[in-house]
Image (cartoon, rainbow, N blue to C red):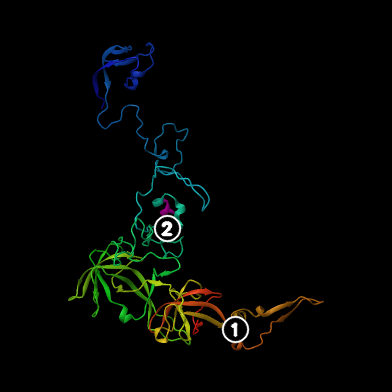
Amino acid sequence: MNRLRRVSLLLTSSATVLVAPEALAQSDAPPGSVTVPTEGGQVVVQPGQTTTTQVYVPPPGYPAPGVDINPGLPSSSRPITDTSRSSDGFDLNQPSDRSPVVTGGKGGSAVLGSGGGGRAVSVPPVHLVRRGDTLWDLSAYYYGNPYQWPRVWSYNAHIDNPHWIYPGDQVRMRKIGVGGERAGTAGMGGGTPREGLINRRPLVPGNTVFLRTQGFIGDPKRDVWGELVGAREDQMLLSDGNNVYMTMREGVDVQPGQRLTIFRTVRQPEKVEGARKVPGEIVAIKGTVRVDQWDPRSRVARGKIVESVDVIERGALIGPVDRELDVVPPRTNQKTQWARVLTSMYPHVYMAQNQVVFIDRGSADGLEPGNRLSVVRRGDAWRRSLVTSTGMARERALLDVPDRVKFETTPLHGDERKFPEEIIGELRILRTERHSSIALVTVSHREIVAGDRCIARRGY
């Protein structure tokens, strides 16, 4: 609906008058003048002249005549009147404020556009993975640079393959202890640790092994303190920030502010021929809970999950699982003690340098943290490989013959059991239980397997 309003126009030599498009029609008016419609027809307004006429005033909320009402639409969504050509710029409905595409080789420097369009304002401690997420995309969204994905991967030791993350996974987006706060200062005379970050001391490279998703309990009856039985929130899968209820077994006393590990039992160390069967269990660590309230009469504790490395459900176990293993300096062995390698923290077939392994001897056998054991093996490794290889593996060609090439079978003389033992690696004890120990592989010349013999020689 058009609206007509009577207005007065004063056209000066430096003024600009906005009128309806039909008022700007070409006419024989002198230069610098404008022709505007009036009730009686048209009038020519000269510079410095005043006239009264009617002009079009749009209703509230409607655009003025001649205004493009589609500037915010992508080219593919704009109406066109000329069907002989396309005005589509093939922008595929991308927002106009999107940051420019980063170009350059992998690992090289990249020049980013300004403005930060499509980028998060702040980086959260943890990102919950949704369908379609990748470390590349998360780095671009939170840091503005997709080539930062190795940085994110370094914060998440539980991600084995950076190319595969799954919906429901929790990806830590910030380094523990950043932002001017030290992680793990509570209980050591410091301030309050950051929520969502585990309470631990800063790691010194080479001096501490931090167990993130796997752990070990020496005695299930002693180290399992209780069970996570409920939560305040109406949800099945629990994570950082959820308030939970725990029941504690008799004989256990907890204190408000105390932090305990949430875990589930995974497996016992495998039975190895010739080795002692140890009572401990390997557990999967799910997170950390802080005790907020404790009722010793009902033996029910209320707490808050302050760290989660995996989804947590009701039925998870609670206990003081030690997740820090200090790499102690070497300590002289007080006695000669033979032992066998049982398994690694993860169920690997082969073990090598910098991996954590279990052996079947502990404090009751005279071992102490810092003791060094040599991993020894007797025999010819290539000869043993013939057991699973084809018959042709022993064949060798006789090249220095005048006639056609001939073959002969490689002789395997001698008894391997009488060969001298060779050192193929070295272990250092990190922690001892009564009948088992946790050790770090500090040297490996060959792969180590379950059942390998190791010896702590007196005086070494």
Is residue 288 left or right of 82 when viewed as pictured?
Answer: left
Residue 182 appears at what percent x and percent y? 34, 60
Q: Identify residue for label 2.
A: 152
Residue at the image position 29 percent from the left and 11 percent from the top? 49
Residue 259 appears at what percent x and percent y? 29, 69
Q: Is residue 226 above or below residue 11?
A: below
Residue 39 occupies quadrant = top left
Q: Secondary structure of the magenta portion, mostly? A: helix
| Secondary structure of residue under mark 2 | helix
**Badges 2 and 1: C-beta atoms under 8 Å apart?**
no
Residue at the image position 62 percent from the left and 89 percent from the top? 415
Residue 32 appears at what percent x and percent y? 37, 14
For label 2, the crowd category at 10 Å Cα-Cα, with few meaning under 14, some 14 to 19 and many 20 or more, is many
- For the N terminus, the quadrant is top left
Q: Pick whichever, 284 or 315, lies toward us.
A: 284
Report the amino acid beneath label 2.
Val
Q: Is residue 125 above or below residue 342?
A: above
Q: Identify residue for label 1.
A: 379
Q: Pick whichever, 442 or 265, lies toward us.
A: 442
Q: Which residues are magenta?
A: 136-140
Q: Is residue 330 visible?
A: yes
2 or 1: tag closer to the N-terminus: 2
